[in-house]
Amino acid sequence: MDKHRPYRRRAVSLVNRAYSSDPRERVATIGGVHSDRTHWKLSQEAAIALIEAGTDEFFVAAATGAVKLVVLNHGGQKYLQTEREKTHPDDLLTLCPALSRVGV
């Protein structure tokens, strides 16, 4: 296996929001559907661990193509955002608007 390529690429189609106005605490879990049609769901912390281990890569489908999720760190607190979040505020939450829920 190539060390520079993740083992799994996962399309995110579900974002469960946490009840918080803090951008670092807005995402509770992410999820999607495997190619065999089984569902997967991970906490933000678990997804971060997989990204940092280099085993998984997560992306969201957008009109312009796949948008990769990245790990950011603010004051020692890690959180997920899309790679284009600076130009598209709340990008992760808005790319899955019909599936985003508060407090789930």
Image (cartoon, grey):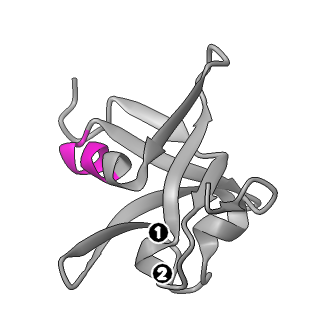
Residue 4 versus residue 7: which sits nearer the camera?
7
Residue 7 x/y as whole percent: 33, 29
Q: Which residue is mark 1?
A: 81
Kindly identify the residue that appears in the image at 65 percent across and 48 percent down. Answer: 14
Which corner quadrant holds the C terminus?
bottom right
Q: Mostly what secondary structure, the magenta segment?
A: helix
Please tell me whether residue 62 is drawn above or below residue 14 in the rendered image. below
Kindly identify the residue that appears in the image at 36 percent across and 68 percent down. Answer: 79
Q: Secondary structure at mark 2?
A: helix
Residues at circles 1 and 2 in contact by the CB criterion of under 8 Å: yes
Span colored in magenta: 48-54
Q: Which residue is mark 2?
A: 23
Three-letter code, disc 1: Gln
Looking at the image, residue 74 sits to the left or right of residue 41; the answer is left
Please tell me whether residue 2 is drawn above or below residue 19 in the rendered image. above
Q: Secondary structure at mark 1?
A: strand
**Can residue 82 be found in the magenta stretch?**
no
Image quarter of residue 24: bottom left
Spatial CA distance of label 1 from label 2 is: 9 Å
Residue 13 x/y as whole percent: 67, 46
Three-letter code, disc 2: Pro
N-terminal label among 1 and 2: 2
Residue 65 x/y as whole percent: 66, 55
Kindly identify the residue that appears in the image at 52 percent across and 74 percent down. Answer: 84
Residue 37 x/y as whole percent: 67, 18
Please tell me whether residue 77 is drawn above or below residue 102 in the rendered image. below
Image quarter of residue 75: bottom left
Q: Which mark is residue 25?
A: none
